[in-house]
Image: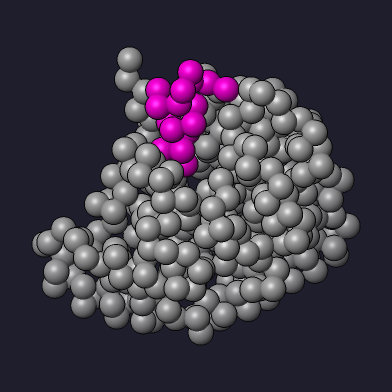
């Protein structure tokens, strides 16, 4: 039986579109989880719908649906990318080693504890294969998580026959680590945590997450998806790579798609015990997937902390503009540590997306426990102003 499961396959699976912008996520809550409305598939459906509209596509004024960095690449990364084009005819053979050395030096792990990939999505799929697919002893098992989280990895694991045991988030929309710890049983194959969490933007305090991983990982492997970790201030981040260096059964994935602006260039990495990465490598192209141009740009971007600080500052500025506008309309929101904000809306998700889109605003919605939500990515100050201008008309 072929257990291969690419993100592209996942995006295209299921009846995603019927008529108009039918992109609401009525099945988003894992209590009645529906893999055809997972995060990535929903976003691909949005893209497919834009293509279907063709010439009727309205001018996009604000593309704030996919958590991209609106400020683009670091100037140093652009320069490195252009220069690297001269060697674009060659496979990347040594560039990955240098990037892993840079990451390892900063995070306190050996290069052997790092595996590169074309974005982090490939790693999520490989993790699902290893823990719940044909590679897993016995297959299936249970993935323990909290409800209302990023479900790309969970969807793939479920496609492989795994069960998803999701405890509710806390009233602050955070992972409930105490409840999760109490649910661990003999069938628990892996614990999945997204921190900062997508779509809520919340985090587990660093000391709590570190203590949880230190206590639980010797019993059950812990997988922490840290796609948005770079938006946190250093003092807000849990020093989880140090636990990997200490030998804990802990697996981290990160991506350059967010603060580094590499959503189209594709670069990510995992930090994990060396023996685990050797197994994971069997189900991923790993070092061979990122192009030499992307790797060269990645090294420049990783070292350009001035640009990262700029992006963090501008992200906070855009967030504050959004917060103020929502408050003025009497809307509550979930305080976010990432480059997006989740807030409940007072109309159906499909209607909201349609009306925003007709005004040139690309945004994203989902539904949880019968409550419609908008998750809006933080764009430039001007883009947030355009979003609010339309929002105030239709809300």
Figure quadrant of residue 246: bottom right
Horizontal relation, residue 194 to residue 10: left or right: right
- Of residue 39 and residue 234, the one placed in the foreground of this image is 234
Against 309, is 152 above or below?
Answer: above
Specify start and end residues of the magenta stretch as a single range: 124-141
Task: Using the image, determine if residue 155 lies above or below residue 101.
Answer: above
- The percent coordinates of residue 227 (x first, y second) are 54, 56
**Residue in the image at 38% along x and 41% along y:** 280
- Residue drawn at x 58%, y 71% as measured from the top left: 380
Residue 146 appears in the picture as rendered: yes
| Residue 9, picture quadrant | top left
Q: Is residue 130 magenta?
A: yes
Specify whether residue 14 is in view: no
The colour scheme of the drawn protein is one colour
**Residue 262, x across and y down, in percent:** 41, 63
**Residue 15 falls left or right of residue 30:** left
Across and down, in percent, residue 60 comes to 49, 57
Q: Nearer the viewer, residue 98 or 264?
A: 98
Residue 307 lies in magenta, yes or no?
Answer: no
């Amino acid at each position: 039986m072929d257990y291969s499961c690419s993100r592209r396959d996942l995006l295209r699976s299921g009846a995603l579109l019927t008529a108009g912008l039918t992109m609401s996520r009525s099945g988003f809550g894992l209590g009645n989880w529906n893999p055809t409305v997972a995060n990535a598939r929903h976003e691909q459906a949005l893209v497919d719908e834009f293509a279907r509209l063709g010439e009727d596509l309205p001018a996009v004024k604000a593309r704030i649906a996919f958590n991209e960095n609106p400020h683009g690449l670091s100037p140093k990364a652009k320069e490195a990318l252009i220069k690297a084009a001269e060697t674009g005819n060659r496979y990347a053979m040594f560039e990955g080693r240098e990037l892993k050395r840079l990451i390892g030096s900063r995070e306190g792990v050996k290069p052997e504890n790092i595996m590169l990939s074309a974005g982090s999505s490939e790693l999520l799929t490989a993790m699902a294969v290893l823990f719940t697919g044909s590679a897993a002893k016995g297959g299936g098992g249970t993935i323990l998580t909290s409800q209302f989280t990023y479900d790309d990895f969970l969807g793939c694991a479920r496609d492989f026959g795994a069960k998803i045991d999701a405890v509710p988030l806390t009233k602050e929309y955070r992972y409930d680590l105490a409840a999760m710890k109490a649910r661990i049983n003999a069938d628990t194959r892996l614990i999945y945590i997204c921190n900062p969490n997508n779509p809520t933007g919340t985090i587990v305090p660093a000391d709590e997450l570190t203590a949880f991983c230190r206590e639980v990982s010797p019993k059950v492997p812990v997988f922490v998806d840290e796609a948005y970790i770079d938006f946190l201030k250093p003092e807000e981040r849990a020093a989880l790579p140090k636990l990997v260096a200490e030998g804990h059964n802990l697996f981290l994935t990160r991506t350059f798609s967010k603060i580094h602006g590499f959503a189209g260039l594709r670069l990510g990495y995992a930090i994990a015990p060396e023996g685990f990465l050797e197994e994971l490598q069997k189900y991923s192209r790993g070092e061979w997937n990122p192009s030499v141009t992307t790797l060269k740009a990645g090294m420049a971007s990783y070292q350009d902390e001035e640009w990262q600080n700029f992006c963090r500052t501008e992200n906070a500025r855009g967030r504050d503009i959004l917060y103020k506008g929502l408050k003025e309309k009497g809307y509550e929101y979930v305080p976010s540590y990432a480059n997006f904000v989740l807030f409940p809306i007072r109309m159906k998700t499909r209607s909201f997306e349609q009306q925003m889109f007709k005004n040139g605003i690309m945004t994203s919605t989902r539904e949880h426990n019968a409550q419609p939500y908008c998750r809006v990515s933080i764009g430039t100050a001007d883009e947030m102003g355009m979003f609010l201008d339309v929002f105030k008309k239709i809300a």
